[in-house]
Image: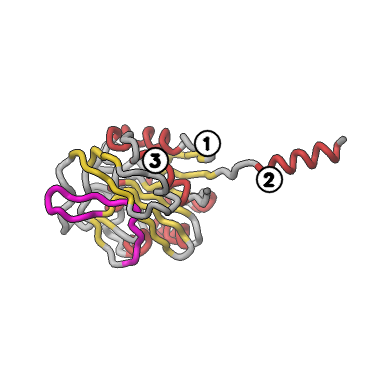
Amino acid sequence: MFQFASIVALLAALSADPKANVLLVTGQDLHKWKETTPVVVEILQKDPRIHVKVVEQPSFLADPSIHQYDAIVMHWMNWKVPAPGKDARENFRRYVASGKGTVLIHFACGAWQDWPEFREVVGRVWDPKLRAHDPRGKFQVVPTEVAYPITAGIKPFEADDELYTCLAGDRPVQVLAQARSKVDGREYPMALVYQYGKGRVYQCLLGHDAKALRQPGVDELLRRGCVWAAGLK
């Protein structure tokens, strides 16, 4: 009986869905991070495989314990305050390069303006010399990679957000969704993936506020991107 019970327990463990521990880093931003952070947690944890831990100090990225997490969600931008220093930069860089996942939401692309390597680590960053975004409003987001795991089955949808036009970088990235600016008529990426070392990087440029995050389509892009970055199916 004991042997049979042990085999049943082992089979159950092997067949169980894998889980992902995700670190959500927030606490600094030009945007209302205290309102958006719980919305992001709610969106991500609609997938029962994802468990989110929130830290409200970006300086935590210097802590060796970040390497225990399957993915880090960057939901911060050090607006008019010093960015985390050398230890945090190098620890984060090694985290991504080692094969872990990273998700950047909205203005997180503007973090670490004093660290040029950040552009190499995440593929695209905010360039303050470029036009920042269209006026807040509604626009259509169109998936461009319909067979990619993150965007498979997602139809074009309406966002109510800031359409970012400010990304800079020359590393090859894969654009998964885009939107047309009403100001200049050009197409801009709204979601993209990138590889740094062995690491998986996903950027969702949408998410200006709680309303923007809750838009059908936006929440799905964010959740699927986190699942992908964490290495889950």
Q: Is residue 35 visible?
A: yes
Q: Position of residue 35 (x, y in %)?
A: 31, 32
Q: Residue at x 51, y 40 (%)?
A: 50
State the image quarter where residue 166 is shown. bottom left
Residue 21 magenta-highlighted = no
Please rate how many residues cluster around mark 1, counting C-alpha atoms within 10 Å: few if below 14, some from 14 to 19, many from 20.
Answer: few
Residue 186 magenta-highlighted = yes
Ranked by sequence position, the earlier of labels 2 and 3 is: 2
Part of the protein shown in magenta: 171-188
Question: Looking at the picture, which amino acid does disc 2 mark?
Answer: Leu
Task: Answer with left or right where residue 212 lies relative to residue 42.
Answer: left
Q: Which residue is mark 2?
A: 14
Please rate how many residues cluster around mark 2, counting C-alpha atoms within 10 Å: few if below 14, some from 14 to 19, many from 20.
Answer: few
State the residue in front, 35 or 193: 193
Please rate how many residues cluster around mark 3, counting C-alpha atoms within 10 Å: few if below 14, some from 14 to 19, many from 20.
Answer: some
Q: Which residue is mark 3?
A: 220
Ranked by sequence position, the earlier of labels 3 and 1 is: 1
Task: Answer with left or right where residue 1 lies relative to residue 85.
Answer: right
Task: Answer with left or right where residue 170 lies relative to residue 165.
Answer: right
Q: Which residue is mark 1?
A: 48
Disc 2 is placed on an element classified as helix
Q: Is residue 108 visible?
A: no
